[in-house]
Amino acid sequence: MPFTLATWNINSVRLRAPLVTRLLAEEGPDVLCLQECKSPVDKIPMEVFQAAGYSHTVARGQKGYNGVAILSRLPIEEAGAEDFASLGHARHIAGRLENGTTIHNFYVPAGGDKPDRAVNEKFGQKLDYLTEMRDWFHKDAPAKSILVGDLNIAPREDDVWDHKKLLKVVSHTPIEVEALAETQDAGKWVDITRKDIPEGRLYSWWSYRSPDWNGADKGRRLDHVWATPDIANAAHSSRVLRDVRGWEQPSDHAPVFATFDL
């Protein structure tokens, strides 16, 4: 059953519901994973997405912050939700398709401004969150699984606009990159985006602070699609829909796509 999956930090699903429906209409992914929905589940406009053909959903939400949801044209059942680092945040939801594929949708904490847990509690929370993700995958090795989401780390030198300038900037510091690598290794996850696009600069996020985000192109690849080794070779056609960042009232993230022949 081939299916196309997309992940997108939407930065308020209610505010940007028209952008979601536009993406669904124009690109037609079978599964769309959203992060930073900023809404309780009962306030997410599910009826709008159902009218677009996405009648299957699993979600975790909270008022004004965080929140993750999976919209699907294919039948999907909830397969768990973890509260890593005991933050009480809606940052993870898992769904299982009828073919047995489990999809994990994550929104890893951003980590604040200073990469020092001694002076920045949020940075410590981010590292703790990744540590508990790592330990969870060590304890319960995933199989036939896909992990997507805004992981808030750009791991490679060509995942950021300037490696040297960003080494002390949260999202690209060595300690974060190492923590993400340990989490990836724990589940033996394959970075599908970079499997398909192994070379060159690649970004999925551009700051709102830049008046000319496209021209300046100071981006970072914060949004990821991973898969377990047993299905990684079934993945192909990865792409970042950069143009979506230029839509009216956009999220600061662009959707990332991949197709799986399963």
Image (cartoon, rainbow, N blue to C red):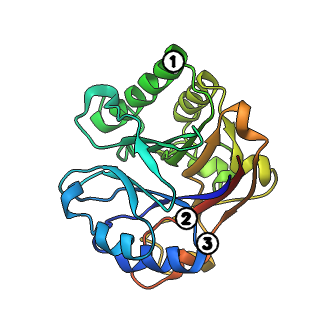
The location of residue 18, given as percent across then percent down, is 38, 80
Label 1 vs label 2, nearer the camera: 1
Q: Which residue is mark 2?
A: 255
Q: Tell me which amino acid carries mark 1.
A: Asp
| Residue furthest top as drawn | 139
User: Alpha-carbon distance for marks 1 and 2?
Assistant: 29 Å
Label 3: few (<14), some (14–19) or many (≥20) C-alpha neighbours in 10 Å: some
Please determine whether, in this image, residue 106 is positioned above or below residue 6: above
Q: Residue at x 25, y 50 (%)?
A: 61
Q: Tell me which amino acid carries mark 3.
A: Arg
Please determine whether, in this image, residue 189 is positioned above or below residue 39: above
Label 2: few (<14), some (14–19) or many (≥20) C-alpha neighbours in 10 Å: many
Between 31 and 151, the one nearer to me in the picture: 31
Q: Evaluate if marks 3 and 2 touch, with contact meaning CB atoms under 8 Å apart.
A: no
The answer to whether one can see residue 135 in this image is: yes
The location of residue 10, given as percent across then percent down, is 40, 64
Q: Residue at x 42, y 70 (%)?
A: 251
Q: Residue at x 63, y 33 (%)?
A: 144
Q: Secondary structure at mark 3?
A: helix
Q: Which residue is mark 1?
A: 140
Q: Which residue is mark 3?
A: 242
Between 79 and 258, the one nearer to me in the picture: 79
The answer to whether one can see residue 250 in this image is: no
Label 1 vs label 3, nearer the camera: 1
The location of residue 8, given as percent across then percent down, is 49, 60
User: Alpha-carbon distance for marks 1 and 3?
Assistant: 35 Å
The location of residue 139, given as percent across then percent down, is 50, 14
